[in-house]
Amino acid sequence: MSRKITVLLFTCIIVLSLVLSACRAGQAPPAATQISGDTSGETTTTEKVVETVEVVKTVIVTVEAPGQAPAATPQVKIQVAQAPGFGETLAAVQSRGNIICGVNGQLPGFSFLDPEGNFSGFDADFCRALAAAIFGDATKVEFRPTTTQERFTVLQTGEIDALMRNTTWSLVRDTELGLNFAPTTFYDGQGMMVPVDSGITALTDLEGGTICVQKGTTTELNLADVMSTEGINYTPAVFEDVNATYGAYAEDRCDAVTSDKSQLSSVAKGLLPDPENHVILDVTMSKEPLGPVVRHGDDQWFDIVKWVIFATLTSEEFGISSSNVDEIRGSATNPEIRRLLGLEGDLGLKLGLTNDFAYNVIKNVGNYGEIYERNLGEGTATFIPRGLNSLYKDGGLLYSPPFR
């Protein structure tokens, strides 16, 4: 006999003892008198005891039926209360006919105007992925360049629908600003760039020097923290935007410039007149998880942005790209791939979209790997090795929950 049954039988004995003790202690007539008398619909003491025994027996058989496999637990469906604001963003976007996406606009490889006058880059492509998911058309995006000073304000006031700009996720920004950070699309860290001929090889070599930094960024705060911790005296030269910051550095108005390593690499290769004359020091001053940001209050929109990102990760994991998605869609047997591409289930409908939303993202924009290679890959002028921005199975940090 299993320990579980032993415990239940012991419990049964205690219950029966308590019931019988209560019967004997009460003022009611003997059991025989109650049975022969008119009960007027009342349950007799004997019947109560019998019922108690039957209940305990039933519990024992149900819980520990020998040789019987436990039944699968059904998925409980609960009607979730929707907070005020739920669905408003998607409705406004659909009514307008496009997405207004906040970007940097001055960062080669991430978001900048190409020679044809179109916004290009890694962040810009995630704006297009969101448009493809909603409209099935990646061109339905209005790009709004934003500065570091105004980026949160234009999102808070509803001037943009999402911020797809090099913006670091932090606790204060996640709480005090009334914002939600979607999954990180680019894992970065703050670095320091100096002229090759400066002789500077470590942060300590910047003692008494001047460092260019952009105003209102975590970069500015991190610089102060690190230099204070290391006991290095320096003078910050603070500027409003990317062009002013690197313009001052290029004019030798500071000894070094600091920002996210991706920005240093991007700007050095894309904006500085002599990129080969500058080097990024082998030091990482912070963690900088960068990704899309939305307003608090509309969980449907938050979910949409999250799962568009996850669709690009999952499709790369399964080897589904813009070039083979139609072929795979026509022959897929893997249940998760079929759900991802809208062949089974109603995952898109749960987001307020069509079930083929992920298919539209992959077909029109590509998977994460395609987006990365197109903008930051080895064949680009802004090449950055993937490193931490590889899938988890390749030693990176990128990971999607299941499409289920």
Image (tube, rainbow, N blue to C red):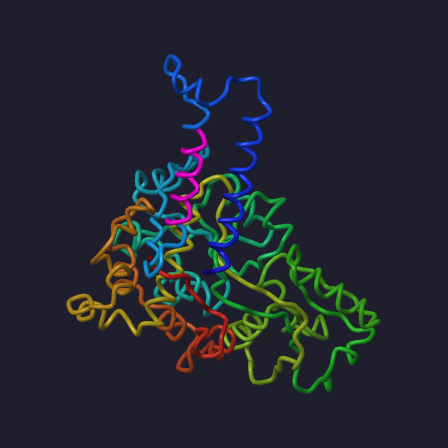
Magenta stretch: includes residue 314: no
Write the residue at 43% across / 77% down.
393
Quadrant holding the C terminus? bottom left
Which residue lies at the image location 36% right of the left edge and 72% below the top edge?
317
| Image position, residue 220 (x, y; %) | 69, 61
Q: Can the viewer see residue 370 in this picture? A: yes
Q: Name above or below for residue 163 compared with residue 402.
A: above
- Locate residue 324, reporting x and y percent: 22, 72
Residue 160 quadrant: top left
- The residue shown at (46%, 79%) is 383
- Residue 87 falls left or right of residue 320: right
Q: Main secondary structure of the magenta part?
A: helix
Choose between 116 and 357: the one closer to the eye: 357
Total labels: the figure holds 0
* Residue in front for this viewpoint, 188 or 81: 81
User: Does residue 247 appear in this view?
Assistant: no
Q: Which of 351 and 65 is in front in this view?
A: 65
Q: Residue at x 50, y 65 (%)?
A: 107
**Which one is nearer the viewer's eye here, 111 or 133?**
133
Tell me if residue 16 comes above or below residue 349 in the rendering: above
**Residue 27 point in image, percent of width and height:** 57, 17
Q: Position of residue 240 (x, y in %)?
A: 63, 56
Image quarter where the N terminus lies is bottom left
Examine the structure image and report whether residue 57 is included in the region drawn in magenta.
Answer: yes
For the record, the magenta segment spans 48-61
Q: In which quarter of the image is residue 247?
A: bottom right
